[in-house]
Image (tube, rainbow, N blue to C red):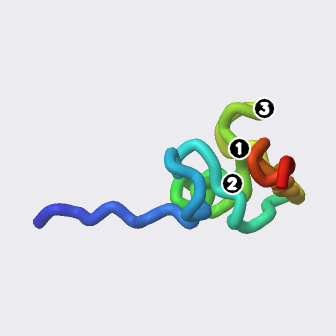
Amino acid sequence: MARRKKPLKSGWWFGTCGHSNLNGQYFRSIPHQRQQRKKGIFWKTWRGRYYPLQATTMLIQPTAAEAAS
């Protein structure tokens, strides 16, 4: 029987969901179990995969066409 991959809980807007999870749980330290680590809030390219972030902020900038109108 083939095992089904469990989906990560990253945002719909991030195409490479294995590299970040901004909608995850906050853990004070990196969990030992792999499945728990995947549930945490992290951004892989900042301090390494699964480094627990406390919070994130998303800033949206208008495009040049929107700013001109």
Dot 3: what SS?
loop
Q: Amino acid at mark 3?
A: Arg
Q: Amino acid at mark 2?
A: Pro
Mark 2 and mark 1 lie on one chain; the one further toward the N terminus is 2
In the rendered image, the quadrant that contains the N terminus is: bottom left
* Residue 52 position within the rendered picture, expressed as x and y whole percent measured from the top left: 79, 50
For the point 39% across and 66% down, the residue is 6
Instruction: Please indicate whether residue 9 sits to the left or right of residue 30 in the image.
Output: left
Check the image and name the residue furthest to the left. Answer: 1
Tags 2 and 1 touching, CB below 8 Å = no
The label nearer to you, 2 versus 1, is 1
In the rendered image, the quadrant that contains the C terminus is: bottom right
The label nearer to you, 3 versus 1, is 1
Please tell me whether residue 23 is drawn above or below residue 68 in the rendered image.
below
For the point 78% across and 53% down, the residue is 66
Please tell me whether residue 48 is drawn above or below residue 68 in the rendered image.
above
For the point 69% across and 32% down, the residue is 45
Mark 3 burial class by Cα count in 10 Å: few <14, some 14-19, many 20+: few
Q: Which mark is residue 43?
A: 1
Check the image and name the residue furthest to the front. Answer: 69
Tell which of 44 and 61 is nearer to you.
Answer: 61
* Residue 16 position within the rendered picture, expressed as x and y whole percent measured from the top left: 51, 45
The label nearer to you, 2 versus 3, is 3
Mark 2 burial class by Cα count in 10 Å: few <14, some 14-19, many 20+: some
* Residue 28 position within the rendered picture, expressed as x and y whole percent measured from the top left: 86, 57
Mark 2 and mark 3 lie on one chain; the one further toward the N terminus is 2
Q: Name the residue that disc number 3 marks.
A: 47
Please tell me whether residue 60 is drawn above or below residue 51 in the rendered image.
below
Query: How far is the residue under mark 3 from the one under mark 1?
Result: 8 Å
Dot 2: what SS?
loop
Q: Name the residue that disc number 2 marks.
A: 31
